[in-house]
Image: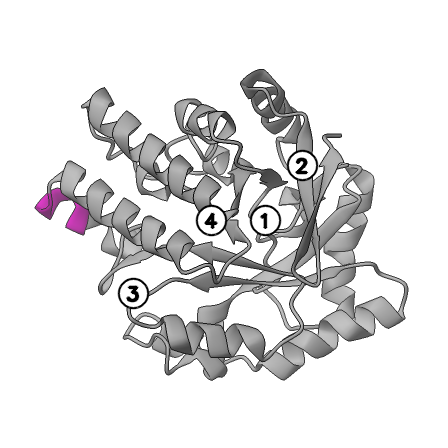
C-alpha cells in the first residue's frame, strides 16, 4: 500500500479534467490510496480564521466548487479522497473545528506556515530570517506544532520541520534533538499521524521532511506515518517515493496509514 494524500490542484480551475491528470499519474506510479488536500486559506469560507495582505488576493475559491469536483470525479469512476490542508493558528481552534466539521473530509492535514504575520516559507518574506535568531524561530515554530497536535483537530501533521526549507537550521544538535523528541512524544500521546514528505527534495534544503533523526524519534514513540509528495502539479505525484520508502524502512517502519471518513487503518508498507 502506498499513499499520497498531500496533493494540490490549485494551479487550475476545479474541474474533473484537471483532477484526472493527477489521478493518471497516481496510477502510473502505483499509488492506490490518494487524495486532494487544498490549502484552506484559498477559500472564502476561511476568512474569519486567517486573512492578511498575502492571503487576500488568493482567498477567492468556494468550498462547494472544490467538493463538487471531488463528487463528480467519484461519479466518473475516479477513486479520490477528499482532504484539506489547514493552517493552524493559536486561538482559532473553535473556528477551525467548525470549518472542518462542516464538510465530509476523509482526512485533515494540519500545518504551520505562519508565525504571526510572517510566512516563513514564502520567498517573498525570506529576508525576515536574517532579522531573527534561528533557534528562536524554530522554537516558536515547534511551539505551534505542539499546539496543533494537542488540539486534536487534525489527522496528519504535515512536513514537521518545514523551517529548514531555506537552510536556516540551528547548529546546536542537542537543541534539535530536544525539539524532535518533544514533538514525537506529543504526536504519540495524541494518536496523530505524520508524513514523510518528498517535497523537501524539491526545495532549497534538498532533503525530505522530516529529518531522519526526527523520523527516528517518531518511530521510537510509535507514531504512524503516511507518505506524501505535496504535489502542486501532476508530474510530482509520487515523486521520489523510492527515497521515501528507503527512509521509512531504514527507520524501521513496516506499516502505513490510510484514511476514510477520518478513520485510520494500518496497512503493510508498499
Could you say where residue 251 lies in the image, as x and y percent from the top left?
54, 20
The 10 Å Cα crowd at callout 4, few under 14, some 14 to 19, many 20 or more, is some
Residue marked by disc 2: 256
Q: Mark on residue 190?
A: 4
Q: Which mark is first along the chain, 2 or 3?
A: 3
Q: Secondary structure at mark 4?
A: helix
Could you say where residue 13 lies in the image, as x and y percent from the top left?
64, 73
Total marks placed? 4
Q: CA distance from mark 2 to mark 4?
A: 17 Å
Q: Is residue 144 left or right of residue 97?
A: left
Q: Is residue 209 left or right of residue 162?
A: right
Q: Secondary structure at mark 1?
A: loop
* Residue 170 vertical position relative to residue 237 in the rendered view, above or below: above
Q: Is residue 166 left or right of residue 79?
A: left
Q: Mark on residue 231?
A: 1
Image quadrant of residue 226? Answer: top right
**For discs 1 and 4, the disc positioned in front in the rendered view:** 4
Amino acid at each position: 500500500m502506498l499513499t499520497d494524500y498531500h496533493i494540490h490542484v490549485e494551479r487550475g480551475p476545479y474541474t474533473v479534467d484537471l483532477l484526472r491528470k493527477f489521478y493518471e499519474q497516481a496510477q502510473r506510479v502505483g499509488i492506490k490510496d490518494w487524495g486532494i488536500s487544498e490549502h484552506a486559506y484559498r477559500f472564502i469560507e476561511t476568512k474569519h480564521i486567517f486573512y492578511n495582505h498575502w492571503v487576500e488576493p488568493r482567498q477567492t475559491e468556494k468550498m462547494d466548487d472544490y467538493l463538487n469536483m471531488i463528487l463528480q470525479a467519484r461519479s466518473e469512476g475516479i477513486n479520490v479522497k477528499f482532504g484539506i490542508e489547514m493552517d493552524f493558528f493559536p486561538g482559532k481552534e473553535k473556528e477551525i473545528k467548525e470549518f472542518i466539521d462542516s464538510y465530509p473530509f476523509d482526512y485533515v492535514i494540519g500545518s504551520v506556515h505562519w508565525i504571526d504575520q510572517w510566512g516563513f516559507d514564502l520567498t517573498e518574506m525570506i529576508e525576515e530570517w536574517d532579522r531573527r535568531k534561528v533557534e528562536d524561530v524554530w522554537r516558536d515554530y515547534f511551539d505551534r506544532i505542539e499546539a496543533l497536535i494537542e488540539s486534536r483537530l487534525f489527522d496528519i501533521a504535515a512536513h514537521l520541520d518545514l523551517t529548514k526549507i531555506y537552510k536556516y537550521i540551528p547548529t546546536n544538535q542537542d537543541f534539535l534533538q530536544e525539539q524532535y523528541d518533544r514533538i514525537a512524544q506529543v504526536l504519540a500521546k495524541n494518536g496523530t499521524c505524520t508524513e514523510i514528505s518528498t517535497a523537501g527534495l524539491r526545495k532549497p534544503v534538498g532533503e525530505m521532511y522530516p529529518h531522519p533523526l526526527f523520523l527516528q524519534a517518531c518511530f521510537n514513540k510509535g507514531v504512524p506515518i503516511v507518505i506524501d509528495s505535496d504535489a502542486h502539479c501532476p508530474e510530482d505525484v509520487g515523486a521520489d517515493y523510492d527515497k521515501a520508502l528507503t527512509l521509512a524502512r531504514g527507520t524501521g517502519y513496516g506499516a502505513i496509514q490510510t484514511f476514510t471518513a477520518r478513520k485510520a487503518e494500518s496497512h503493510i508498507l508498499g
